[in-house]
Image (cartoon, rainbow, N blue to C red):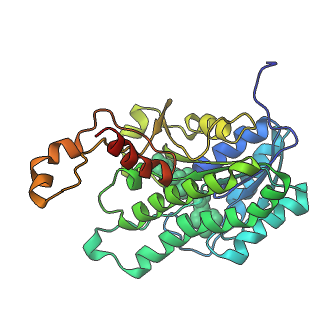
Amino acid sequence: MSNELRYDGKVAIITGAGGGLGRSHALLLASRGAKVVVNDLGGSVDGSGSGSASPAEKVVAEIKAAGGEAVVDSHNVAQRESAAQIIKTALDNFGRVDIVINNAGILRDKSFRNMTPELFDPVMAVHLMGTVWVTQAAWELMREQQYGRIINTSSAAGIFGNFGQTNYGAAKMGIVGFTNVIALEGAKYNIKANVLAPGAKTRMTTDLMGPMADQFDMDPAQVSPIVAYLAHEDCPVSGEIYSAAAGRVGRIFIGATKGIFDKKLTLEKIRDNFDKIRDETGYTVPHNATEEMGLLFQAMNNQ
Ligand code: NAI
């Protein structure tokens, strides 16, 4: 098809691409001409175990069998020096980095009262700090070449909340804040950064989703098209969140209500106007903190 979106000449790093969603993103991008670094440390769902390069090797073999180009990388995203080695793998093999898809992740669920540092810290380290360190290692290159596409993987569990996932939810919402800021800092260098909130049947979610995963055909391949679009040169947006599962794709955003404005606020006025403060009618979606502050000036002017 002549109007198909392609990635010829582009190099993509996909972390945690030895299985699940990352594998699916890697297969799609490679099938459209991207050279792909398939990063995966190969541990278990909770991040324990000694790790193995074999899941990533299998994905690279699949890509090559289909005529694509890919290379294995088995560095840990969660440490700064190690994350930098992933970028080095891309440079050594393909000479550049255009796309970073931060996807690697682990789960250590427990209700908050039973949460311990052993459960909390590694989840923050892999999801949030892994995203930070891999992105930072590619950042200077992207600035110099005035081009970059970054997709960071969040989750509805953080954006909206999910029982038993304080560690994961904090990390995943941290990723949203991180992406908001790099989207602003990258704008003048044509670096675009967006967030994915996926849903798919993978080894991470098979137990959690149960029969729902089969009922809706939660194939990771249904999530990869939006990821690939956000990774494309034509991607029109930055600093946004997209949700995708089982063929449904939508945008998630953080809005601000009109609220109330009263120069003589009192505690009782808050109580008496609380419904109005919460009322979602006529909300706005600020694109940065300054725009949010602008709501105050709007309210003053409208007085
Ligand atoms: P998965 O367990 O199949 O994939 C995660 C991969 O990351 C694994 O292959 C694992 O070996 C790798 N990994 C873990 N720690 C790593 C590290 N330190 N360095 C390098 N690689 C590492 O799970 P799935 O579902 O494909 O998850 C992909 C991403 O999507 C994760 O960030 C997850 O939190 C997120 N997500 C998935 C959802 C789903 O419904 N499957 C829902 C919401 C978010």
- Residue 150 appears in the figure: yes
Quadrant of residue 42 within the rendered picture: bottom right
Q: Position of residue 96 (x, y in %)?
A: 86, 55
* Side of 218 relative to 237 (left or right): left
Up-down: is 252 above or below 42? above
Quadrant of residue 72 within the rendered picture: bottom right
Residue at horizontal 66 percent and vertical 71 percent from the top:
76
Residue at horizontal 53 percent and vertical 37 percent from the top:
219
* Side of 174 relative to 43 (left or right): left
Residue at horizontal 12 percent and vertical 53 percent from the top:
269
Q: Position of residue 263 (x, y in %)?
A: 23, 54
Viewer-side residue, 99 vs 272: 272
Viewer-side residue, 14 vs 296: 296
Looking at the image, which residue sits at the far bottom? 117
Residue at horizontal 88 percent and vertical 42 percent from the top:
9
Specify the quarter for ligand 1. Answer: bottom right
Viewer-side residue, 202 vs 285: 285
Up-down: is 173 above or below 202? below
Q: Position of residue 70 (x, y in %)?
A: 82, 50
- Residue 203 appears in the figure: no
Q: Position of residue 300 (x, y in %)?
A: 33, 45
